[in-house]
């Protein structure tokens, strides 16, 4: 089997504008979560923004791809490089802005038509002819202008906002003319993107791939949807805690340069770690609730361990999905207790970065590779009173780390596990 290694990482999150900055702030126990609300029609929620206003998907992608190539010491064009860039929301923010603009334009036209069809005033009146059409009074749930950080859109560039076009834009950015994929599998997107890249390399379809996930999910519809579900936290993210409240939405992106070990050796590239194996299943159970016994999640982890040629006892650290929702944390803890020996180190980094949805698995893999590189376990920020009997890492600590398991569990029952090692 062809070995697949990681030779470059680009990352941006609410913790910092780079991989190193985010990692150092994570180790320091800091959090990028703040009580905010960029949309006046919604009440404030804790969220993890990269900047002062919601980020733009295209800009995030360009940033992390450039950083990953620089980290891997590669210069475009990379004609034979595969591109696998996923997102669970993709350009949804642009679509919402476009829909709002179209609504406003249509409403304004109707108002103008109503005005022009009204009876004319007596001759000689200058008030009527100088008067502008009355200002449209929009419903209170639709703000009168799009959010500042997202440019205005029109139907002329609508095709650029289709779900797969972010991956296409990355291919253009690096001059890649090989295969381009754009996975979209909820919170499992990041891990699936990396796994697909590894499979392409292992099957000889390419020797190098740019893979990862990007998410800019702070939109009115996403916030309102999760609020309607009762999934949003009110004060912060507290994974696995007795007092956990729900998830905190966050922005983020992580992209990796994956190469065959042979190619990496030929060019004497630095190596963060090896992709050992992966496993994927689906619950086929419910839209937003995990299967209560974790059967499919257990199957995904067993697949991953088997393909990685590892036993549960070989895992030194588990980067948990840990969304701080009631059902996920309960199910995930039960699965870990069922499969792994007591004492395996466990932490979730969402208490620091927020839940970046489709990008969360990619961020988790990046932090796991940094843990492997530096032999440091990152803390489960926000965890004060654990509800479950696991070896949660609540403070940064040195450890002998050889094998890491990174987990993601997405809405719709998408289960993903990936194994990483030296």
Image (cartoon, rainbow, N blue to C red):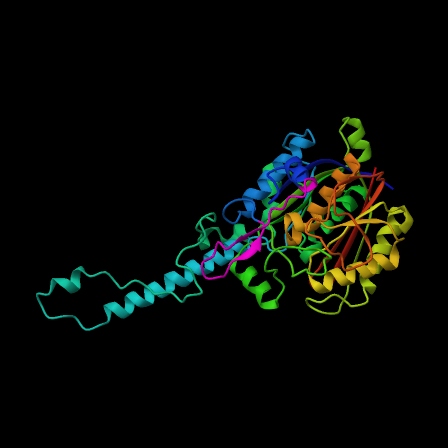
Q: Residue 56's spot in the image, x, y percent?
A: 53, 47
Q: Residue 91's spot in the image, x, y percent?
A: 55, 53
Quarter-of-image position of residue 211: top right
Q: Residue 53's spot in the image, x, y percent?
A: 50, 48
Figure quadrant of the C terminus: top right
Figure quadrant of the N terminus: top right
Q: Residue at x 48, y 50 (%)?
A: 157
Q: Is residue 311 visible?
A: no
- Give the residues in magenta: 26-48
Residue 160 left/right relative to 175 = left
Judge by depth and name the residue closer to the eye, 288 or 117.
288
Residue 419 left/right relative to 179 = right
Residue 401 left/right relative to 186 = right
Q: Is residue 119 above or below residue 127?
A: below
| Residue 289 falls within the magenta-colored stretch | no
Q: Residue at x 43, y 50 (%)?
A: 152
């Amino acid at each position: 089997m062809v070995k697949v290694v990681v030779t470059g990482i680009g990352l941006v999150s609410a913790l910092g504008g780079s991989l190193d900055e985010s990692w150092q702030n994570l180790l320091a126990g800091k959090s990028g979560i703040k009580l905010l609300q960029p949309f006046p029609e919604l009440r404030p929620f804790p969220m993890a923004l990269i900047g002062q206003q919601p980020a733009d998907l295209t800009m995030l992608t360009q940033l992390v791809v450039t950083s990953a190539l620089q980290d891997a010491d590669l210069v475009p064009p990379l004609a034979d490089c595969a591109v696998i860039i996923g997102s669970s929301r993709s350009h949804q923010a642009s679509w919402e802005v476009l829909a709002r603009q179209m609504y406003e334009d249509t409403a304004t036209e109707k108002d103008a038509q109503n005005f022009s069809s009204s009876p004319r005033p007596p001759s000689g009146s200058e008030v009527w002819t100088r008067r502008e059409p009355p200002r449209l009074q929009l419903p209170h749930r639709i703000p009168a202008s799009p959010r500042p950080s997202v440019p205005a859109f029109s139907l002329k560039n609508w095709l650029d906002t289709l779900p797969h076009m972010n991956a296409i834009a990355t291919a253009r950015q690096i001059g890649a003319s090989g295969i381009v994929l754009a996975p979209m599998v909820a919170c499992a997107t990041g891990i699936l993107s990396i796994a697909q890249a590894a499979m392409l390399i292992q099957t000889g379809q390419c020797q190098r791939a740019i893979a990862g996930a990007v998410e800019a999910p702070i939109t009115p519809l996403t916030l309102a949807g999760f609020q309607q579900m009762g999934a949003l936290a009110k004060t912060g993210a507290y994974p696995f805690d007795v007092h956990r409240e729900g998830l905190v939405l966050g922005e983020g992106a992580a992209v990796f340069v994956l190469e065959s070990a042979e190619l990496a050796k030929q060019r004497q590239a630095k190596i963060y770690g090896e992709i050992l194996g992966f496993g994927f299943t689906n619950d086929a159970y419910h839209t937003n609730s995990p299967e209560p016994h974790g059967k499919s999640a257990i199957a995904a982890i067993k697949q991953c361990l088997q393909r990685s040629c590892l036993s549960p006892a070989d895992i030194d650290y588990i980067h948990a999905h840990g969304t701080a929702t009631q059902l996920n944390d309960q199910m995930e803890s039960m699965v870990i207790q069922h499969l792994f020996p007591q004492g395996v180190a466990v932490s979730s980094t969402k208490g620091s970065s927020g839940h970046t949805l489709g990008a969360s698995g990619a961020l988790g893999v990046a932090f796991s590779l940094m843990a492997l590189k530096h032999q440091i376990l990152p803390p489960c920020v926000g965890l004060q009173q654990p509800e479950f009997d696991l070896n949660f890492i609540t403070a940064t600590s040195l450890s002998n780390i050889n094998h890491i398991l990174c987990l993601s569990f997405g809405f719709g029952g998408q289960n993903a596990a990936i194994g990483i090692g030296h």
